[in-house]
Every structure is written in C-alpha cells, then in structure tokens.
Image: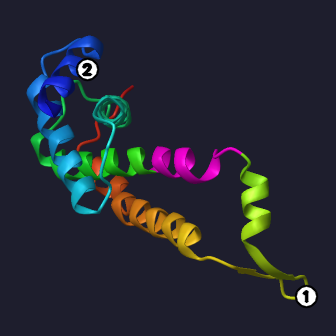
Amino acid sequence: MNEELILETIKEYLIDDETRYIKDAALMALKRLNGYGYEGVDVEMLTLHALSVREFILNYCNIEKMPKGLMFTYVNMICASYLELYVIKNYVNSEDNEKAIAASIASITEGDVSVTYKDNTSSDKVLNAKALISSLMDGYRAYLTRYRRMVW
C-alpha cells in the first residue's frame, strides 16, 4: 500500500525518469522514521518531501539527475525535512498553544532566565526531534559539494 501511494504521488509530480530512485529513497526514509519510533507517517507527505529535497539537491549541485552516491544523504535530508514538519504540526501549531504552554510551566525566574516545566514529556519530544533533525542534516553540504557543478 505504501509503495503504491509513493509511486502514485511521484508520478503525479515528477516529470523525468527517476521514479525508482525516488521510490527507493522514500521507502528507506519511511523505514528509518519507523525505526526512530515515528509511527503513522503520512506517506504522501513524505513523498512530497522527497520530491522537494530532490529539487533542492539538483538545484544546489546544478545537475540533471540524482547521483547514486547521494542516496543516504538524500534519505537523511528527506527524514529531516519530514521531521521539521512533524515538530511544527504536532508541537508548535497546536490549538490553544499559549494556554497549554502556560499550564505546563511550573515556575519562571527572570534573573539568569530559568523556566521550569511541570511535565517534561512534550518538551523532551520536541528536543529529541530537533536533535535528530540536526544529526540527520549534519554535514550534508560537504556531501553535496562533491557532486556540485559550476555554472557560468
């Protein structure tokens, strides 16, 4: 089912013949996200992130096709892009966000600024997701630069 939805989304938005490469990358990203504990991944949204990241890589490197040597960098960037949306969707844009934040704060100290929360689970989830995003995106430009072409 996931593979069919990925292929359908790719065919809807893709112009060239890299369908299999993108499908494989999206499936690897899905497996990786599930391995990190993110269940219920929106496959269509993940595939759109795969297409968006592909466009970024092609434009940054000034190339026409995705190099095979960038597969794992590509998968990491897809995961990071999806997780950024996941954090925004689940933790930043929630309804009554200000009320929820105010209710979760135990104390605020203004001298040397300190905030103590009643429940650390939601803030821990955000911090863990951001740490994962950071580790996935760490050094990707060095990998992309290897494939970059100069344009005059």
Amino acid carrying mark 2 in the image = Thr
Side of 58 where 70 appears, left or right? left
Q: CA distance from mark 1 to mark 2?
A: 52 Å
Residue at left offset 18%, top offset 14%: 16
> What sort of colour scheme is used for the picture?
rainbow
User: Does the rendering let one see residue 130?
Assistant: yes
Find disc 1 in the rendering and name its residue: 111
Residue lying furthest right: 111
Residue 147, picture quadrant: top left
Find disc 2 in the rendering and name its residue: 9
Is residue 114 highlighted in magenta?
no
Q: Main secondary structure of the magenta part?
A: helix
Q: Secondary structure at mark 2?
A: helix
Image quadrant occupied by the N terminus: top left
| Residue 87, position as x, y percentages in the image | 51, 52
Residue at left offset 32%, top offset 43%: 41
Side of 42 where 68 appears, left or right? left
Q: Secondary structure at mark 1?
A: loop
Give the mark nearest the N terminus, 1 or 2: 2
Residue 132, picture quadrant: bottom left
Is residue 88 highlighted in magenta?
yes
Closer-to-camera residue (108/66) = 108
User: Does the rendering let one see residue 146?
Assistant: no
Image quadrant occupied by the C terminus: top left
Q: What is the magenta range?
A: 84-95
| Residue 139, position as x, y percentages in the image | 36, 61
Side of 8 where 89 appears, left or right? right
- The correct choice, above or below, for 91 with respect to 12 in the image is below
- The correct choice, above or below, for 12 with respect to 48 in the image is above
